[in-house]
């Protein structure tokens, strides 16, 4: 008997929720609503979403680097 794939929740990247929150925070800080921007197709909206994505990527890299550093300090890396 095999398990039905629809019975399990889909796998998600470990930092996906943090990434979403960082993107939403960046967009809110710029005075916009993420949901509204996703529905727009103009150059300003695309630029803001791209900027938010780069911001989140930079912050995630920083978080991962700090975690790696802490693991190294504790001899776990």
Image: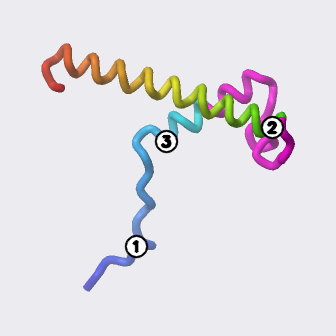
Along the viewing direction, whichever of 3 and 44 lies nearer the viewer: 44
State the SS at label 1.
helix
Between residues 11 and 72, which one lies in front from this camera angle?
72
Label 3 CA crowd tier, 10 Å (few <14, some 14–19, many 20+)? few
What residue did someone put label 2 on?
A: 45
Crowd class of label 2 (few under 14; some 14 to 19; many from 20; radius 10 Å): some
Extreme residue in the top direction = 73
Residue bearing mark 1: 5
Residue drawn at (28%, 17%) of the image: 69
19 sits left or right of 6 in the view:
right
Q: Which residue is mark 3?
A: 16
Where disc 2 sits, the SS reads helix
Going from N to C along the chain, the mark reached first, 2 or 1, is: 1
Residue extending furthest toward the left:
75
Residue 2, by quadrant, is: bottom left
Which residue is painted at 80% across and 31% down in the image? 32
Where are the magenta residues, as a range?
23-43
Residue 45 placement, left or right of 75: right
Label 2, label 3: how many angstroms apart (C-alpha)? 22 Å
Picture layout, residue 64 above or below residue 8: above
Position of the C terminus, as image quadrant, is top left
Residue drawn at (32%, 23%) of the image: 67
Give above or below for 75 relative to 46.
Answer: above
**Which structural element holds mark 3?**
helix
Q: Nearer the viewer, mark 2 or mark 1?
A: 2
């Amino acid at each position: 008997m095999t398990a039905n794939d629809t019975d399990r929740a889909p796998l998600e990247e470990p930092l996906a929720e943090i990434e979403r929150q960082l993107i939403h925070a960046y967009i809110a800080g710029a005075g916009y609503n993420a949901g509204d921007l996703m529905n727009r197709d103009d150059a300003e909206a695309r630029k803001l979403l791209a900027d938010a994505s780069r911001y989140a990527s930079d912050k995630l890299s920083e978080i991962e680097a700090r975690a790696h550093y802490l693991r190294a300090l504790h001899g776990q890396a």
